[in-house]
Every structure is written in structure tokens, then in C-alpha cells.
């Protein structure tokens, strides 16, 4: 996997940006649409489900980026890039519905060339010159094959997944964020150009590596949070509340991450395991017997430390950790 590090030349920068239509109005769409607009991309429409809540979110988002909110049946789909930002389980079905709409739109546009009266109406509806060239989705786990129906109607397809967390009330920067790109060659090139314009760095995956990539991505944030709430549970046993545990733990966690980034994991490791202090670990395990879930996390992480980090007294520690 080769990360795109060098910025493209001035001639590439100056070329006209493709238009984009977003399908979905959830958390990622709410972040991606403004980021694209800020980077100079025109968002032609936000395509939402017919549910009242979806349309309400789409209308709000469309107002923010100077676009329009539509359902699939009312979508023009004249943008060059169709970007699906919907849940994984909805990608294939949404792509199939969009592909049918593309066929209908192109048929109407073709008929319009022989009917001057209808031509004006179609131009007003945005259907006179469908220009779809690329279709993306942003699932980390699923490959570009989910968009096969859009490939059949002429789009070059790719999956484009940012290795970043998007949650309400948080606005992370895309500067330097890695994007995993997988798909057709033309769509990969188009996606990487857009990622560059957004300030990110892209790398290409093969379809067979998508699931392994997503398992890694899941460990970078969602399961990291699972560890952190388990850490809070351990603090509760020491008499601290969860909010207090978060506040008190942040300085050492921040320093650990800084050390990890600058020194690597081995040189950032500290505590009883690097010293081989089996007596202390044994006391921890005895205390945590009253909290089996926290103890299971402690043991799993400790065994990982024995496998991957500089630990002394390794054999005795392993016996302790594996004892029932």
C-alpha cells in the first residue's frame, strides 16, 4: 500500500472540479458535504429517503452547502460523482435504485432531443444531460462491488473510506487523514484527487483486504473506547466516579499517545510488566475477581503485552494470567 504523500502539480490543481451528488444525510454526509463545498466542489443535490426525518436532515444540509434535497424518485443525478454515504446494509439496494433512476433520466433526456416542448421541461428538472462518471461509497468493510449496478450503467466505481471518527458535536480536521481507496482504476484516480483536495492522504487497498482493514480501523477508535470505559470501571473500584476517572486519566493517556507517536510502542512501555513485577500483577488479578468483565480485559491486554512488548519475568507472568 503506497500512501499518496506528494501533492499534485499546479496544472492538476487548476483543473475544473467535478460536481458531486451525495446520497444520504447522516453523520458522515453532514461532515463530508461542507468539507467538499469548502474545497470548491459544487454539491448538486442531497438524495435522502422519503422518511420525514431523513428529508428534514437533507434539507438542512442542503441549505448549508447551497444544494437541494431530493428523494431518489426526484433526483436529477446529473453530477459527475455520485457519493453514497449510507449504512453498509443499504449500499447495494440504494445503488440498484439509483441505477434504475439513471437509466430513466437518460431515457428522458434522449427523448427530449426529439421533442422541443419536453426539452425545456427536462432542463428545468435537471435531466437534460446526465453526466455520471464515478460512483463511490464510504464503507470501510465492503468493497466497490456493492456498486456493481451503477457500474453497469457506465459509472466507474470505488469505495472511499476515511480513517477517522465522526460523531455529533465534533468537527475533526481532514488534514492528513488517511483514506482507504479500492475500486476501478479511473474511480481510484478520481477519488484520490478529491481526497487530496480535502487535505487528506489516500492509499489503495485490494478488495480482499477490506475486511482486515476494517477490523484494524475498528480497533483504532470504537474498541479503544471500549477499553476506556473498562478503565473507568477499574477506577470505580478504587473509589472514583467515571467523570473523575476520565479527567484524572487524560494527562497520562495523552503522554502515552505522544510517546507512542514519537518513540514507538516498546520505548513507551512502563509499569509492572516491563519490570516483571509478578507480585503486583497477582494482587491485581485477585482484586479483579469480583469484576470478571474488567478482569477479562486486563488479562487479554496483559497477554498481548507478553507477546508484543518488552516484558521481564515472562514465563511466571504468563502462568499467572492463564491460571483459573
Image: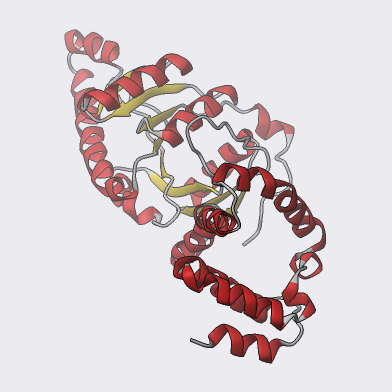
Closer to the camera in the image, 220 or 305: 305
User: In the image, residue 242 lies at what x, y percent?
Assistant: 55, 46
Give the residue drawn at x 70%, y 81%.
279
130 w.r.t. 253: above or below = above
Q: Nearer the viewer, residue 245 or 73?
A: 245
Q: Residue at x 56, y 60 (%)?
A: 234
Q: Is residue 36 left or right of residue 136?
A: right
Judge whether residue 293 can be spotted in this image: yes
- Seen at 35% across and 56% down, the residue is 145
- 243 horizontally vs 14: left or right: left
Q: Is residue 251 left or right of residue 215?
A: right
Residue 24, compared with residue 311, is above or below; it is above
Lateral position of residue 306 relative to residue 154, left or right: right
Q: Give the residue drawn at x 67%, y 91%.
A: 315
- Between residues 53 and 64, which one lies in front from this camera angle? 53
Q: How many marks?
A: 0
Q: Would you identify the image quadrant in which residue 55 lies?
A: top left
Q: Position of residue 236 (x, y in %)?
A: 55, 54
Amino acid at each position: 500500500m503506497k500512501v499518496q504523500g506528494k501533492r499534485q502539480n499546479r496544472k492538476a490543481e487548476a483543473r475544473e472540479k467535478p460536481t458531486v451528488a451525495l446520497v444520504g444525510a447522516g453523520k458522515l454526509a453532514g461532515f463530508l458535504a461542507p468539507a467538499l463545498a469548502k474545497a470548491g466542489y459544487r454539491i448538486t443535490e442531497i438524495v435522502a429517503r422519503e422518511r420525514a426525518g431523513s428529508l428534514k436532515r437533507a434539507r438542512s444540509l442542503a441549505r448549508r452547502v447551497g444544494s437541494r434535497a431530493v428523494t431518489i424518485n426526484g433526483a436529477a443525478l446529473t453530477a459527475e460523482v455520485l457519493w453514497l454515504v449510507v449504512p453498509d446494509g443499504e449500499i447495494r439496494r440504494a445503488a440498484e435504485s439509483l441505477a434504475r433512476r439513471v437509466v430513466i433520466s437518460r431515457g428522458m433526456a434522449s427523448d427530449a432531443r426529439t421533442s422541443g416542448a419536453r426539452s425545456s421541461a427536462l432542463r428545468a428538472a435537471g435531466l437534460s444531460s446526465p453526466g455520471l462518471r464515478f460512483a463511490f461509497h464510504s464503507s470501510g468493510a465492503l468493497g466497490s462491488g456493492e456498486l456493481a449496478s451503477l457500474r453497469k450503467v457506465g459509472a466507474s466505481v470505488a469505495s472511499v473510506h476515511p480513517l477517522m471518527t465522526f460523531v455529533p458535536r465534533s468537527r475533526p480536521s481532514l488534514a492528513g487523514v488517511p483514506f482507504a481507496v479500492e475500486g476501478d482504476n479511473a474511480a481510484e484516480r478520481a477519488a484520490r484527487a478529491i481526497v487530496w483536495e480535502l487535505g487528506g492522504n489516500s492509499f489503495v487497498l485490494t478488495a480482499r483486504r477490506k475486511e482486515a482493514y476494517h477490523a484494524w480501523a475498528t480497533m483504532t477508535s470504537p474498541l479503544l473506547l471500549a477499553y476506556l470505559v473498562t478503565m473507568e470501571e477499574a477506577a470505580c473500584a478504587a473509589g472514583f466516579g467515571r467523570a473523575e476517572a476520565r479527567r484524572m486519566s487524560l494527562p497520562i493517556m495523552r503522554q502515552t499517545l505522544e510517546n507512542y507517536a514519537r518513540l514507538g510502542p516498546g520505548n513507551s512501555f512502563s509499569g509492572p510488566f516491563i519490570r516483571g513485577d509478578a507480585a503486583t500483577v497477582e494482587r491485581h488479578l485477585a482484586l479483579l475477581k469480583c469484576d470478571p468483565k474488567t478482569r477479562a480485559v486486563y488479562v487479554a491486554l496483559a497477554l498481548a503485552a507478553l507477546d508484543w512488548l518488552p516484558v521481564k519475568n515472562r514465563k511466571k507472568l504468563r502462568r499467572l494470567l492463564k491460571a483459573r
